[in-house]
Amino acid sequence: MLELAGAALRMKEVLGLEAEPVAVYLLGPGDHRADASFIQASGHRHCQALMRARRGERILLTSQDLACPAAAAFMNLQRKDAGHE
């Protein structure tokens, strides 16, 4: 974990970031890497989840919870029940 903290500090210095860097993981069906430390976000846009993550929250956003059709299309997360193929 110390290596990640050092890498984050270096990224902030080099890139002039004011907030912490954010990692995004795309989990496939049946992938259970998210644990109880994640907060299930409902009705969020992708950018809203990223803003919360910048403040240190661990956010879980599923395709069913994603409120932004453009982000869902970009990440190929369209829901079939919403009329997307």
Image: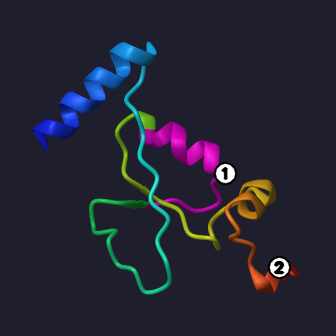
Q: Position of residue 70 (x, y in %)?
A: 80, 55
Q: Is residue 84 left or right of residue 72?
A: right
When the figure is inspected, residue 11 is found, relative to residue 30, above or below; the finding is above
Q: Which residue is mark 2?
A: 82
The amino acid beneath tag 1 is Arg
Q: Which of the two discs, 2 and 1, labels the residue nearer the N terminus? A: 1
How many residues crowd mark 2 within 10 Å: few (<14), some (14–19), many (20+)? Answer: few
Q: Which residue is mark 1?
A: 45
Place residue 36 in its image quadrant: bottom left
**Residue 17, labelled with which disc?**
none
The amino acid beneath tag 2 is Ala
Q: Are marks 2 and 1 in contact (CB under 8 Å)?
A: no
Q: Is residue 73 left or right of residue 61?
A: right
Looking at this view, is 42 or 7 the one in front?
7
Q: Position of residue 69 (x, y in %)?
A: 80, 60
When the figure is inspected, residue 62 is found, relative to residue 25, above or below; the finding is below
Q: Tell me the distance, in whole angstroms, between the alpha carbons under discs 2 and 1.
A: 16 Å
Q: Quadrant of the C terminus?
A: bottom right
Q: Residue at x 75, y 73 (%)?
A: 78
